[in-house]
Image (tube, helix red, strand yellow):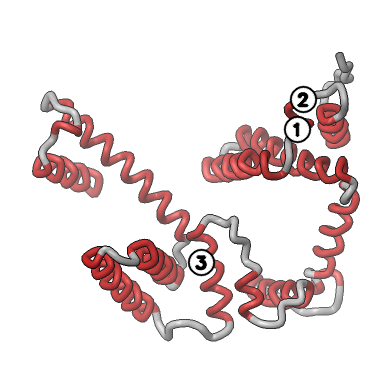
C-alpha cells in the first residue's frame, strides 16, 4: 500500500506526484497500461464535459471538470516521460516560448490595438512558425480530429482570408440550394449520396458562417429542440393510449406540428 500524505489543500505538485505513483510499479495496473490511443476517448470526453460546464456557467462543475482535464493533460505527458521522449518541463518551455513569440504586441514593439489585429498577427506568426508557405499548407494543418462542422468552419475561414469567398451571404445560400439539388439527384440515382450529403453540410456551414453562426452550437440547439418536441409528441401519444411506434404517419405529423406550434407560441 502506498501512503499519500493528507493535506488540507492539495496543489499542482501533489497532482503530478500522485499521477506518477499511479503509473509506477506498485501503482495502478490500468493506469500503467494506458497509451495515448487507449486514453484518447477519455481525453476527448473530459474536454467536452468541461465545455458543458462552461455552457452551464456552473463554477462548481467547472472546478471539477477542469481538474479532470488537467489530470488528462498531465497523464498524457507522463506517458511520454516514461517513454523518455519529452518531459513536463519540455512541454511548459515550448508553450511559454510560443506564447511570447505570438504576442509581439505585448512582449515586443508590434502594434495590435484590437482583437482583430491580434488574430491577424497570430495567424501570420503561426504560419511562419510552422513553415506553412501557402494557404493550402495552412488548410492541410487544420486538425482532422476536430468535429467535422468545426473543421469545415475553420477551413472556410482560412480560405476566405486568401480571397476564396462569395461576395455576399446570398451567394452562400445559392450554393447551399445547388448542393441540395445535387443531393436530391444523387438519392434519385442511388449514387454518390455520401459525397453529396457532405457537400450539403459543408455549404450549410458556410451559409451560417456568413451570418456569424457557430455550426456546432446551431446543431446542438437543434438537437435540444428535437428532444423537447419528441417528448411532447410522446406525451401526446400516451394521452391517446398509444406509443409513438403505434402512431400513423398522419398522426405523427399532426402531433409533431402541434408540438412545433406550441413551442413557438
Q: Real-space Cα distance between discs 2 and 1? A: 6 Å
Give percent across and percent down for residue 10.
Answer: 83, 28
SS at mark 1 in the image: helix
- Vertical placement of residue 13 versus 107, above or below: above
Q: Which mark is residue 237?
A: none
Position of residue 39 relative to residue 89, above or below, is above
Mark 1, Cα crowd under 10 Å, few <14 / some 14-19 / many 20+, is few
From the viewer's perspective, is residue 42 above or below residue 118?
above
Q: Residue at x 52, y 60 (%)?
A: 150
Q: Is residue 18 rendered to the left or right of residue 168?
A: right
- Measuring from the top left, give residue 239's x and y in whole percent: 14, 26
**In this rendering, would 78 be left or right of 182?**
right
Q: Left or right of 152: which side holds 38?
A: right
Q: Which residue is mark 3?
A: 153
Residue at the spot 83% in from the left edge and 45% down from the top edge: 80
How far apart are the two marked residues, 2 and 3, measured between alpha carbons? 41 Å
Q: Mark 3 or mark 2, which is nearer the start of the sequence? A: 2
Amino acid at each position: 500500500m502506498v501512503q499519500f500524505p493528507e493535506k488540507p489543500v492539495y496543489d499542482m505538485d501533489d497532482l503530478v506526484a500522485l499521477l506518477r505513483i499511479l503509473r509506477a510499479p506498485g501503482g495502478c495496473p490500468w493506469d500503467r497500461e494506458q497509451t495515448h490511443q487507449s486514453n484518447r476517448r477519455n481525453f476527448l470526453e473530459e474536454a467536452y464535459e468541461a465545455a458543458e460546464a462552461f455552457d452551464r456557467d456552473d463554477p462548481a462543475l467547472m472546478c471539477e471538470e477542469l481538474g479532470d482535464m488537467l489530470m488528462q493533460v498531465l497523464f498524457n505527458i507522463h506517458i511520454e516521460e516514461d517513454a523518455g521522449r519529452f518531459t513536463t518541463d519540455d512541454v511548459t518551455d515550448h508553450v511559454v516560448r510560443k506564447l511570447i513569440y505570438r504576442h509581439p504586441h505585448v512582449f515586443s514593439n508590434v502594434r495590435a490595438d484590437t482583437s482583430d489585429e491580434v488574430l491577424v498577427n497570430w495567424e501570420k506568426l503561426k504560419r511562419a512558425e510552422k513553415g506553412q508557405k501557402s494557404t493550402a499548407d495552412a488548410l492541410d494543418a487544420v486538425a482532422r480530429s476536430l468535429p467535422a462542422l468545426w473543421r469545415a468552419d475553420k477551413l472556410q475561414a482560412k480560405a476566405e482570408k486568401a480571397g476564396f469567398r462569395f461576395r455576399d451571404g446570398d451567394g452562400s445560400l445559392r450554393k447551399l440550394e445547388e448542393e441540395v439539388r445535387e443531393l436530391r439527384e444523387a438519392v434519385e440515382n442511388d449514387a454518390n449520396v455520401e459525397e453529396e450529403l457532405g457537400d450539403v453540410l459543408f455549404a450549410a456551414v458556410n451559409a451560417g458562417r456568413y451570418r456569424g453562426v457557430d455550426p456546432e452550437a446551431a446543431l446542438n440547439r437543434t438537437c435540444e429542440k428535437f428532444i423537447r418536441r419528441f417528448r411532447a409528441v410522446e406525451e401526446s401519444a400516451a394521452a391517446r393510449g398509444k406509443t409513438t411506434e403505434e402512431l400513423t404517419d398522419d398522426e405523427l405529423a399532426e402531433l409533431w406540428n402541434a408540438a412545433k406550434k406550441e413551442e413557438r407560441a
